[in-house]
Amino acid sequence: MATIEEQIQQIEDEIFNTMKNKATEHHIGKLKARIAKLRAQLELHRAKSSGGGKGYYIKKAGDATVALVGFPSVGKSSLLNLMTGTESEVGAYQFTTLEVIPGIMEYEGAKIQILDMPGIIKGASKGKGRGKEVIAAARNSDIILLMGDVFNFRIDVLLRELYDAGIRLDVKPPNIHFSHSDRGGLVVRSTKKLTKMTEEQIIEIVRAYGLISGTIVFREDVEPDRLVDFLAGNRIYIPSITIINKIDQEYAGVRRNIKKYYQEDYMDISVVKNQGVEELKRIIFERLKFMRIYLKPQGGPPDMEEPLVILESSTVQAVCEHLHRDFVELYRFGNVWGPSAKYPGQSVGLHHILKDGDIVTILLRKK
């Protein structure tokens, strides 16, 4: 009997050899659903049989985490050192970094954790070059920094490895909802006109996941891949920034070659010349979408000079966690003034979602 990896390869080969047109779209969608199920089984099997590798569990620190994902020897360690002052080993040979090295970048009142990780290579999502462990660390980040250089700029390879590992960059999760039922078969409903799949195609893909009765509701028109992502349930959606290092060594035709493999916008930087690094810091800060929360002691005025900087749409619980590790357990209630409050001084619980500019008072019970 073929192994799970062999079954996946056989289906991928079938997809590759199938002519892509309207008539085959349904069949390809079913094949992708089967691949997703097999990969989920494979991931579960690996998780049970392996305890992970040294250096790949990194405790989150600071207000947000940025993962440096790139090829070997494109300057990730040098960039980390420049942005954070962390001493990550640098060498002019591949795989200098053998573990994940964290550092903290302070910018506009925010403390941002930067992770320098071993370079990934083609096949990383299947485990080559410790790729599975590196990608596992990337999945826990708030933003991914894709890094190449003027000599190694196949960003499309990085994108494919991350995609195959279930990481979706710069897109939102599909707006789909499924509710189970004990009988009645599968019912398809939509608030939008569905043009990319027929109802029959949708039902076939849903059944491939063992779902035989319930209602699936679409609030957007999605392609088969997006439906598969929803059904798999293990996708991670993360924003990204792409940078090309060593632009000080630019040569004729390099920009044209980069665009051949990567059509989206990217940043030119030179770590050696410290060119574009300050701009990169600003863009990281902006893409993370921080907000400022002002703390007010009970009965006193708010501190409007030194706000707490946290990620957009954070809850009161996130504020408590930033202030002290015991505050969540000791929390009684809070008061909020500002954009998220229905009225000034609204009493709120831990799960109240805050907005930029809110003023918050935290009241704790005694130990």
Image: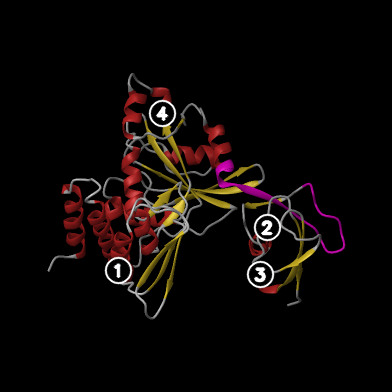
Q: Which of marks 2 and 4 precedes in the sequence?
A: 4
The circle drawn on residue 354 is 2
Q: Residue, x 35% and y 20% (percent of image)?
A: 251
Q: Is residue 2 left or right of residue 359?
A: left
Crowd rating for badge 2 (residues with CA inside 10 Å; few <14, some 14–19, many 20+):
many
Residue at the outermost top position:
252
Residue at the outermost bottom position:
182
Taking depth in this image into account, of 37 and 140 the one nearest to the observer is 37
Q: Which of marks 2 and 3 precedes in the sequence?
A: 3
Label 3, label 2: how many angstroms apart (C-alpha)?
16 Å
* Residue hosting label 4: 246
Crowd rating for badge 3 (residues with CA inside 10 Å; few <14, some 14–19, many 20+):
some
Please state the extent of the stretch shown in magenta in the rendering.
285-305
**Looking at the picture, does residue 330 appear above or below residue 75?**
below
**Camera-side mark, 3 or 2:** 2
Crowd rating for badge 4 (residues with CA inside 10 Å; few <14, some 14–19, many 20+):
many
Q: Which of marks 4 and 3 precedes in the sequence?
A: 4
**Looking at the picture, does residue 321 appear above or below residue 171?**
below
Question: From this viewpoint, is residue 95 visible?
Answer: no
Q: Is residue 361 left or right of residue 108?
A: right
Label 4, label 2: how many angstroms apart (C-alpha)?
41 Å
User: Is 350 in the magenta?
Assistant: no
Q: Quadrant of the C terminus?
A: bottom right
Label 2, label 1: how many angstroms apart (C-alpha)?
40 Å
**Camera-side mark, 1 or 4:** 1
Q: Which of marks 3 and 1 precedes in the sequence?
A: 1
Amino acid tagged 3? Val
* Residue hosting label 3: 328
**Camera-side mark, 2 or 1:** 1
Amino acid tagged 2? Leu
Residue at the outermost front position:
193
